[in-house]
Image (spheres, coloured by chain):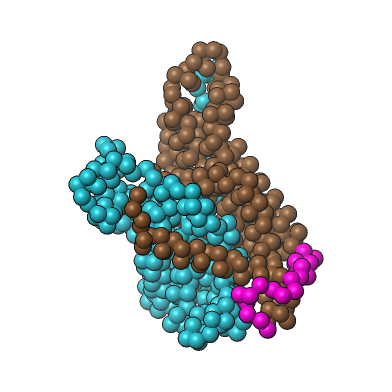
Amino acid sequence: MRQRPSFWYAAPAFAFFALFAALPMVLVVLLSFTSWDGLGTPQPNGVDNWARLADDGQAYDAVGRTVILMVVSWLVQTPISLLIGVWAAGRQRSRAVLSSIFFLPLLLSTAAIALLWKAMFDPNFGVTQSFGGPLGDIQFLGDPSIVLYTVAFVITWQYVPFHTLLYQGAARAIPRNLYEAATIDGAGRLRQFVHITLPQLRYTIITSSILMIVGSLTTFDTVLILTDGGGPGTASRIAPLHMYITGFSGFEMGYASTMAVLLVIVGTALSLLVMRVTGYRSMTSQQEGA
Amino acid sequence: MKRNVPAGASALVWLVLVVGPLYFMVAASLRSRADYLSSSPLKPPDHPTLDNYRTVLTGGFGGYLLNNVIVTVATVAIVVLLGVPAAYAIVRSPSKLVQRGFTLLLAGLAIPAQATIIPVYLLITRLNLYDSLTAIILPTAAFALPVATLVLTNSLRDVPKELYEAQTIDGAGAFGVLRYLVLPLAKPAIVTVVVYTALNAWNGFLFPLVLTQSDSTRVLTLGLWNFQGQFGTNVPALLAAVTLSVLPIFVVYLIGRRYLLSGLTAGFGK
């Protein structure tokens, strides 16, 4: 009788993953060199799609909107989740109760959240209307210059709880004696935060930031539902939505695949950049030594 | 301990931001349409009514809910049935192939499902699975496998070698070890994987949107979107549907809060 598991224990999982996740990844690259309407057979067309993408103003605009959304959501979400996460790491009972309420948006599906906020922002009967005054005059979903920030707000509402959980867990793992030593040295709350909490949370800040970047690049259903498909006009048509519309409404699956490959390249590059700039590798070894 | 005023203040603001919309959702779902259009959305309804819930429940909600349950249960079953033996082999198998496969699986953590939606559509149509619940289940499970296997592997790595060896000396074969040692020890990790996978499958949107079409294969998220078109400006009915869609998972949350929280952050913590 065999005493250790053979390759065959893992083979079904690998095969399943290879067929429905890894193979599509390879196929999307191949499809980016074809023209395909979604029904017939994909026809190879060389680098046509890539040449087209190089001077497609609409695609550039869509990527630009994605970058705005990414930067704004990162800038808003990171300080809020960091602050609340560190605060909630305290052991008081009131904080435990509060943080379980903070966590509630995670229970709602993206579709539910988008529909809820769409009703809240309704220009005629929404909640923002009932406050009246200057707030009532703002067209949160109807003004092309505002809509992307509204989307960023809804994304923040949905995901801050998750990132707060990450920071809460990490903040609890910081050794208490670091703070005790600092207090004896006379360091105030702010200095303790800057010199102990922030450095100790660096690893979590990177993890959380990478998740936010990849998340922004793949945001799709929020915008589709909240803005009725990227409206008003194309003011909120971000890159993944542009890809979806090109492929499944415009029946240009080949060209849409090219955009998909571009998204993967940008996402991977950004994640690697974050790790490089912040010295991810040196930090992991520091953690092990601690 | 000294008070942390800025963080406490932002926590309070956040509390209002979370509770406010949820209150609005439930309050509006209990209003008649006329009441919703005429009175302030933040006041409690004067004459609460369950009519909206009746409208939603007779509008196909039950079917969408059932589809969602089927998709979620099947996805979780596939991920656990394939993931547990795989994690066991990754930790204990002498085979080099297993380690290479694991590396490939980990690379999958970085693949955004959105980017592969077109080839997945191609595969599913070529397999003649288009517009079936199976079409949703297969890719959803495949994209959940990397995280699941990672969580399971990490938990089995923490088991001391001696435990495995002791079992083997007692005469257990590879399968016996899986059955009587790995399964009980991996229980917390399996719960985490179940929660994480179930939430993802439950809330899935893109795969159902692209891979199904007819009303009989519609899942809850798409059903909500569909209600939006169906009810037009009947916002209270729409919000009743949204509230109903949250209820099942809220019940699960009340029962297994601890597992849900550990499940949500699994694989991302330190």
Numbered disc total? 0
Residue at 72 percent across and 64 percent down: it is: B214
Give the percent coordinates (x, y) of residue B3.
36, 56
Q: Which residues are magenta?
A: B38-58
A202 over A159 or under it: above or below? above
Name which quarter of the figure residue A263 lies in. Answer: bottom left
Displayed quadrant of residue A8: top right
Estimate the x, y position of residue B88 in percent, counting from the top left.
51, 30
In screen coordinates, is B254 left or right of A271? right
- Residue at 44% x, 61% y is B11
Q: Is residue B20 visible?
A: yes
Q: Tell which chain the image draws in brown.
A: B
Determine if residue A208 is in view: no
| Of the pair A197 and A235, the residue shown nearer to us | A197
Give yes or no for residue B218 being in the magenta stretch: no
- The picture's colour for chain A is cyan
